[in-house]
Image (tube, rainbow, N blue to C red):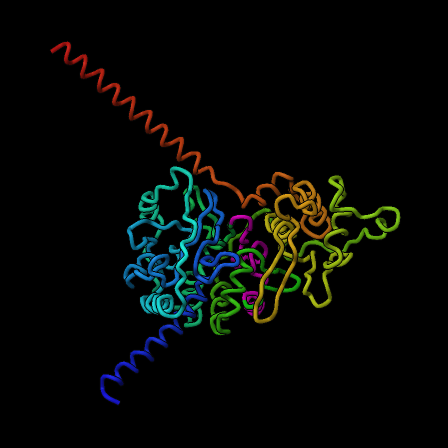
Amino acid sequence: MSASSAALAAGDDAQAASIKRGAYVAIASDCVACHTAPGGKPFAGGLAIASPVGTIYSTNITPSKTAGIGQYTEEQFSRAVRRGVRADGANLYPAMPYTSYNVLTDADIHDLYTYLQHGIDPVDTVPKPTALPFPMNIRLSMMAWNLLFLGSGNSEADATQSAEWNRGKYLADGAAHCSTCHTPRGFLMQELSSHYLGGGQVGPWYAPNITSDATSGIGSWSKDELARYLATGSLPGKAQAAGSMGEAVEHSFSRLTPDDISAIATYIKTVAPLHDASDDQSRFGYGQPFTQLASLRGANPIRSDTDEQASGAVLFYGNCASCHQASGQGSKDTYYPSLFHNSATGGTNHTNLISTILNGVSRTTPKGQAFMPGFGGKANDINALTDNQVATLANYVIEHYGRPGTPVTPANVAEVRAGGPASSLLLLARIGIAVAVVVGLAIIALLIVWRQRRARTA
């Protein structure tokens, strides 16, 4: 083999190794979950992402030169991933978690770029563009937001901690972007660092407190339990992953190495506790077996799909008990989880229970599939549960198997069905612009009057 041939072969081997490492970075970053539309091709974009200020559509990140990032240089790619700025200079919205990805190392960025450019097939399909309502459609405003909230992207290791802890922090704060979902956000949609991993709203789902607090967080979990949950999405008697977390388990965590899962668990277990004063016991300990089945048999036929006035018991036994069992204890193999000692029913925030009833659960990992049908239905689906019925069912489940407290209302259900809470930021921004325009016009009018008076007296 000639020297030039050997160099080419070495170059090919180096690129193949980089592609392999980049594929792992993409898995750790859960890129495919957001950049793949239902029924669409991987990484081709088009997924509708509900945000408090409107729907954002993910972009095509295949190496297509017309629809994707095939024309991006590595420097432009790095700027998009870590600083939220596209190749054309336009700003991305932080639904793309560049605020977390900005800690990724140069080496990981290089490998990810190599993988996306040479490891996947190009798809020449342009996704639906994002068109947020005015003034959120002015992407230039994100420059100011980035100056305030993007941060330095420091990923230096903490010499006082173990190598495993540092690896876990790098993954949790970077590629896995845990804080993007689990940290609450302020008025300007920025993460509230003082409440790091204390729980946050994610569209129609709620990412709960995962700090080390034993009552409000997951401090009662062992490291092995947390690792099991991340790898499978299931921790019987405590929690099951659905929604965004279900997607993260399916596409990312379940495909990481055991060492990386262990590292993330090691780090998360050390996160400073955040306690909610209203929590007098862990959300994983509420509820007990309960049944009313005997009183419904015979004289009271169950017609839960047609009766708007059906009781919670009728709705439960008509829709839930066949899988979750008559007393809510779940199946013996835990495939269908218990409804008591369950984070979805034991938390103060009922969003996840509502969303589970409406949207169901579907995740597939190397350990198998977890599935529950949603009862929200599609448009004109006569078998779908109404907002009132879902509220009645949720309240029955909470009262008997979870943490009683604030009742679920039909309005709560409608909000979740619509994609989650909206933000007042849009309205206030419009009011602010209107006020600024009025003030500006008033100043211009005063200047005109002043100049006219000055001209008359000159």
Q: Reply yes or no: does residue 221 show up in magenta.
A: yes
Quadrant housing residue 320: bottom right
Residue 385 % position (x, y): 68, 45
Q: Is residue 368 visible?
A: yes
Locate the C terminus by quadrant: top left
Quadrant housing residue 432: top left
Labels in figure, total: 0
What's the magenta bit mostly, secondary-structure-wise?
Answer: loop
Q: Is residue 104 above or below residue 278?
A: below
The residue shown at (48%, 43%) is 52
Residue 53 % position (x, y): 45, 42
Locate the N terminus by quadrant: bottom left
In the image shown, does 166 or 125 lie closer to the viewer?
A: 125
In the image shown, does 29 or 15 lie closer to the viewer?
A: 15
Q: Is residue 23 above or below residue 99?
A: below
Q: Is residue 70 above or below residue 453?
A: below
Residue 393 % position (x, y): 70, 46
Quadrant housing residue 213: bottom right
Span colored in magenta: 203-230
In the image shown, does 288 or 73 lie closer to the viewer?
A: 73
Q: Is residue 327 left or right of residue 428?
A: right
